């Protein structure tokens, strides 16, 4: 991963290169030897478009929207024009446009090329007239759309788009009307199929969208979602992974939890956590029960017990007191959480191949349909497959 030297090291464990000083020169040097580039950059000032073109000119594979798609989706005005008549969307007006200017809900002023809510301001309808003469030509106005602000995470391949999650956005407006983005909640709404027509329409209008991209929209109290803008880059909610060498001791879990929450957009005390586990199997614990109890004890030291729910083998999320009353209900339940999640995509067979075992689970009617739940019973019915006889302990390969 390469980042500019003036940007904060948010995921430092994964970085292999930091570009100090002349970032542009370092960037071009990297393009000489890179084969594949997954680009995350803001649309502001045309940065995303320019960098996308440079990746393509260097002959690198671009894991994301093409520069042609970025040229359209990165601009609010161009996006609105491309989607006109295809789907419900918020109107986009140039600040110097002629015609009737009236919106019962007020207006939202934003840069035509912008990202992250920077420079976004809500303006009352009766205040717009006094401001229009002072607005710059690189800004646009949209009528404010009332409803729940959402972000769609979309994956595209070979011209087909699939909504993989519908995420809730937390947006606050200060006294001056400026927007403050306070983070998102992934998978907040389960009905992805309701938003699929919107993704299909955007894909058809902007064919160069590929890989991981997103849509910002608003869901009114009644009616269908209204598109606000398209993000031709990784958007809103993503999964973050933090390494945790739990086999070295329970203190590793505490350190991992604290490190994973260092740059959250909201205070950790305001967040609820859902957990599933298989860590009780590491050699640091004499048995599963002890491992589950130790993990719960550590997690509830970092965050209050009331902030946690625990996924059990009955498919329910249990509060901490209930989990501690029957610790084995939580042991090695991670396979079921994975299967239930995968079952939301439709009927099928989940085959999850790990380093030691393989899980085989039937998916039907929106949930997993296992014949057994515990590891011993699952081995007996061949839904858990273990063919290893000798396994090299991780500790034998480590230097500390």
Image (cartoon, rainbow, N blue to C red):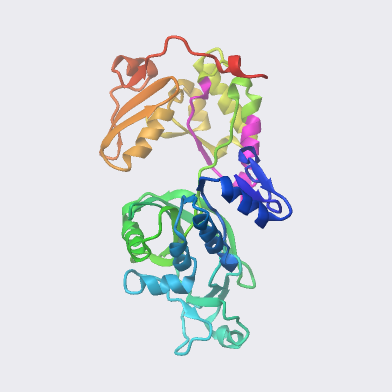
Judging depth in this view, the residue of 291 and 99 nearest the camera is: 99
Check residue 389 for magenta coloring. no
**Between residues 259 and 313, which one lies in front from this camera angle?**
259
Q: Say if the magenta span includes residue 278.
A: yes
Q: On screen, 237 above or below 399?
A: below
Quarter of the view holding residue 227: bottom left
| 354 in relation to 160, above or below | above
Q: Residue at x 46, y 74 (%)?
A: 77
> Which quadrant, please, contains the C terminus?
top right
User: What residue is at 60 percent from the left and 25 percent from the top?
Assistant: 245
How many numbered dots are placed on residues in this image?
0
Residue 209: give x, y in percent of width and height.
40, 58
Point 60% across, 72% down: residue: 177
Q: Position of residue 281 (x, y in %)?
A: 51, 19
Whole-percent x, y for residue 39 in the image: 53, 52
Residue 142: % across, % down: 48, 75
Residue 362 seen by the camera: yes
Identify the residue shown where x is 66% and y is 51%: 26
Q: Is residue 332 above or below residue 127?
A: above
Position above or below: 39 against 98? above
Is 141 on the left-hand or right-hand side of 224?
Answer: right
Residue 135 falls in image quadrant: bottom right
- Magenta-drawn segment: 254-280
Pick the residue in front: 294 or 164.
Answer: 164
**Quadrant in which the N terminus appears:** top right
Residue farthest along the bottom direction in this orientation = 99
């Amino acid at each position: 991963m390469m980042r500019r030297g003036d940007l904060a090291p948010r995921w430092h464990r994964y970085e292999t290169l930091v570009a100090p000083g002349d970032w542009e020169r370092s960037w071009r040097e990297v393009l000489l030897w890179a084969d594949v580039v997954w680009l995350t950059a803001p649309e502001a000032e045309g940065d995303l478009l320019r960098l996308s073109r440079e990746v393509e000119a260097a002959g690198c594979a671009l894991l994301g929207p093409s520069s042609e798609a970025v040229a359209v989706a990165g601009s609010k005005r161009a996006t609105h024009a491309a989607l006109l008549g295809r789907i419900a969307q918020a109107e986009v007006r140039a600040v110097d446009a002629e015609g009737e200017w009236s919106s019962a809900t007020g207006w939202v002023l934003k840069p035509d090329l912008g990202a992250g809510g920077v420079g976004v301001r809500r303006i009352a309808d009766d205040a717009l007239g006094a401001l229009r003469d002072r607005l710059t030509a690189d800004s646009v106005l949209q009528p404010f759309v009332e409803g729940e602000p959402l972000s769609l995470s979309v994956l595209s391949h070979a011209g087909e788009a699939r909504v993989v999650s519908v995420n809730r956005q937390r947006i606050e407006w200060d006294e001056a009307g400026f927007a403050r983005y306070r983070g998102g909640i992934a998978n907040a709404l389960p009905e992805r199929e309701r938003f699929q027509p919107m993704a299909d329409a955007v894909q058809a209008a902007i064919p160069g969208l590929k890989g991981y991209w997103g849509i910002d929209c608003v869901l009114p109290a009644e009616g269908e979602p209204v598109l606000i803008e398209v993000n031709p880059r990784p958007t809103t909610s993503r999964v973050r992974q933090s390494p945790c060498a739990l086999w070295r001791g329970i203190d590793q879990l505490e350190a991992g939890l604290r490190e994973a929450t260092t740059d959250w957009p909201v205070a950790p005390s305001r967040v609820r956590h859902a957990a599933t586990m298989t860590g009780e199997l590491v050699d640091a614990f004499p048995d599963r029960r002890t491992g589950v109890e130790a993990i719960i004890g550590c997690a509830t030291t970092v965050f209050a017990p009331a902030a946690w729910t625990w996924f059990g083998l009955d498919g329910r999320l249990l509060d901490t007191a209930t989990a501690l009353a029957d610790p084995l209900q939580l042991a090695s339940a991670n396979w079921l959480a994975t299967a239930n999640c995968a079952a939301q995509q439709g009927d099928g067979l989940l085959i999850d191949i790990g380093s030691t075992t393989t899980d085989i689970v039937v998916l039907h009617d929106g949930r997993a349909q296992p014949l057994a739940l515990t590891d011993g019973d699952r081995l007996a019915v061949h839904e858990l497959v273990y063919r290893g006889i000798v396994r090299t302990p991780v500790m034998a390969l480590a230097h500390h």
